[in-house]
Amino acid sequence: MARYKKILLALDFHQDNEEVVSRGIELAKDHGADVFLIHVNEPMAAAYGLDTAAWSAQIVDVEVAIRKEAQAKMAEIAKSLSVPAERCVIREGRPAHEIHEIAKENDIDCIVLGTHGQAGIQLLLGSTANGVLHGVSCDVLTVRVGKA
């Protein structure tokens, strides 16, 4: 198996992040790799199909609050893992696309992210893990999170 030099942990800041972080850190230690962290905020209008004209001020307020909360959570996780700020990224957009971009920009060897094992309509529509897997040239480790 090739040695990984740079591992990207994709975080969604849900309770099951610990499983992703644990597996990613274990992998990084085994390979002596640098750890990068990413979190992507999906714009509310796109995620929920909101009428931006009717709700623009409220959407902006909520998105600002979400952004601040994400920054605080990222700083907390980075500090606990001793990951320098320059290797921590918060982006806005479609999660799979933004993860692809960060992986390219930083020559990432392996991406670690969680998957809930989608079923039914969610499986048909696709998940972030599926989108990431089918768009990168590096390895991807999906960690089954939540209830089995």
Image (cartoon, rainbow, N blue to C red):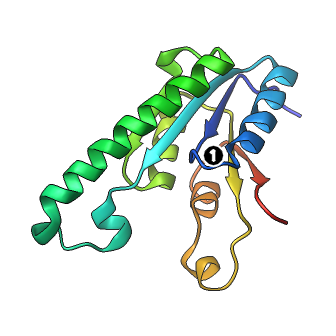
Of residue 42 and residue 68, the one placed in the foreground of this image is 68
Quarter of image, res 121? bottom right
Decide: is 101 above or below 36: below
The residue lying at 79 percent from left, 35 percent from top is: 22
| Quarter of the rendering occupied by the N terminus | top right
Choose between 129 and 21: the one closer to the eye.
21
Residue 65 placement (x, y as % from top left): 32, 43
> Could you tell me residue 103's position as x and y percent?
55, 37
Q: Position of residue 97 (x, y in %)?
A: 45, 52
Residue at image mark 1: 137
The image quadrant where one finds the C terminus is bottom right
Q: Is residue 118 above or below residue 19?
A: below
Residue 127 placement: quadrant = bottom right
Give the SS element for disc 1.
Answer: loop
Which residue is rendered at x = 14% and y = 60% of the image? 56
Q: Quadrant of residue 134?
A: bottom right
Type of the residue with mark 1:
Ser
